[in-house]
Amino acid sequence: MLKYLKIIIISTILLNFISCTNKDQESLLLDAEGGNTERNDALTEEIEITDNTAQVIEMEEVELTVEERLASELIEVGDRIFFGYDESTITDESAETLQQQYQFLIRNPSLSITITGHCDERGTREYNLALGERRASAAKNYLISLGVSSNRISVISYGKEKPSVEGHDETAWTQNRTAITFINND
Amino acid sequence: MLIAYSNSSMSADRPLQIDIMGGNIQSMPIAISYFSSDEDIKKLNLHKNIPNLIANNLINSGLFKLLDRNAYMQNPEQLINPPKFRDWRIIDAQALITGKISKKDNNKISVSIELWDVYGEKRMFGLSLSSQSKSWRRISHIISDKIYERLTGEEGYFDTRIVYIAESGSQKNKIKRLAIMDQDGGNHKYLTDGKSLVLTPRFSPNQQLITFFSYNGVQAGLKPSVYLYNLLNGKIEILGQFPGMSFAPRFSPDGENLIMSLANNGSTNIYIMNLNTKKTKQLTNGRSIDTSPSFSPDGKNIVFNSDRSGGQHLYIMKKNGKKPKRISFGRGSYATPVWSPRGDYIAFTKFTRGRFFIGLMRPDGSEERLIAEGYLTEGPTWAPGGRVLSFFRQIPQKDGSMKTRLFVIDITGYRERELDTPEDASDPAWSPKNIN
């Protein structure tokens, strides 16, 4: 009996949305083109079957919309930058990411973006709302300094309310001190 | 240190009174008899429910200990007459509360109570209230306040409500709703549906309005903003649109103005808005984060949280923004200062050495002390009277998740307890006293 079958097109963004692997079940990874088990290849399809008696394998091609293709491209370019504790400084690494985002915005001149600012949970709600705004604004101002028109960029702070990563340790906190760029859908 | 209460060894002439500022955690033994009533009232169980709710309030204050009713030698019907004090001294009751409920027309009841000083052999006071029988909880809270006031000399806080943020869902995608309940957890209800993220509710002085911060309208291009919720009609109103995000709202003591923060282009400053004209005036300037403003009860000063010196510290300025002065100088970060309704303390959140604390200091910054701590404790709010606070705390669980709950503590720091909520709860705001 077919208990569970899922086809995943590997683009990191979709992987983020569809990840329901049950590690307790036997899992088989197939390359759609061949039969090789292959991971971390942005061009392969990954078929994940968690049924040891599967007889029917349903395949479904997922056609990316323009928005999804752009979102996926932005993620490949680097959609987020990270900050030190209670800091909003653009590091060299962040600057590189933002330069990539700038190039992306040059390639797609009709796009406008929203940058969301986030904090780890080690601060009060109100202060973190302000700090998240400061982080998102730092990213915005860097993009403006590179030449992006300010009216293409909105910022919104979520403080510590919408962490990207669950957990209550340094690993999670590091991942949650971010400014994340999203393409506006309008 | 002052003693917890005057007891039998002292002169009977001295008034029976607890000093709640005493660090002594010995609580006063009191007897609260069931009330005498006719059979109609007994069917509703009010002769037990009302004294039980009064007892619950007084015990929760941590200042009183209820003596076991099985040990009472006089029954409620005998207590229609003045008590035989000797019978109550045997069980060491310092105070005795007796009561009578009678039925009136139109589903109304009349509740009369008397407070007796057992060792002084005196009636301390009596009180009679009448209302709809369905309002028995409010009647009980008002009676509790009067007894508390008589026995402690402090303002009671039982006839009040708490608005807070009810939280559910996963850490990454928390649903947050405004919720309101009586201070003892009764009459709980949700005010918003959870579709928009809402935070930091605060009561207006007339306790009919709640101001809060919400992401409502963000999908439609609005900035996250400060809103008003009207408890009388359930209407929600946005308080203006600004170039950036408006947040951290609080009412002025006269209810005419709102202070809040506006964040724009990396700076956060404090503004005051006249609620009638909706005009705003900027009170702080500069590139720093100035937030969490709170008025002094006389309306003359504002305490707030700023990182202008590098770290996060507390500052006081005049209500027009003039003469800012730093008042916190200890290690760590200071945030969310809230001025006591009595004016004598400022409560705050402190983060130092990886732990969060709730602390108190005098308005000049002296006498700092920490009264509660945890992995995360945050957001103090004062009960009327300024002797009791609530705050919220995240408590790490064995499975790695967090439980978030509201707590109540008094300013001595000795008497802390958890408030019952149906699910995770944060950002409590204690209401002023109900208007009768």
Image: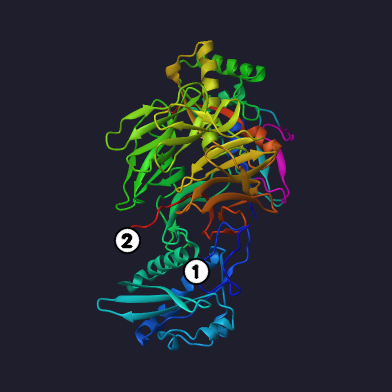
Q: Position of residue B318 (x, y in %)?
A: 43, 31
Q: Quadrant of residue A124?
A: top right
User: How many C-alpha atoms fall within 10 Å of the one at disc 2: few (<14), some, or many (≥20)?
Assistant: few
Q: Which residue is mark 2?
A: B436
Give above or below for B118 relative to A148. below
Location of the N terminus of chain A by quadrant is bottom right
| Residue B203 relative to residue A107: left or right | left
> Looking at numbered disc 1 in the image, what kind of residue is underneath it?
Pro
CA distance separating discs 1 and 2: 28 Å
Q: Chain of mark 2?
A: B
Residue with the mark numbered 1: B15
Which SS class for mark 2?
loop
Taking the image as drawn, is residue B175 in sight?
Answer: yes
The answer to whether B67 is drawn above or below residue B206 in the figure is below
Q: Is residue B26 left or right of residue B37?
A: right
Badge 1 crowding class, 10 Å Cα cut-off, few under 14, some 14 to 19, many 20 or more, is: some
What x and y, as percent, mark residue B250? 42, 40
Which residue is more in the foreground, B327 or A129? B327
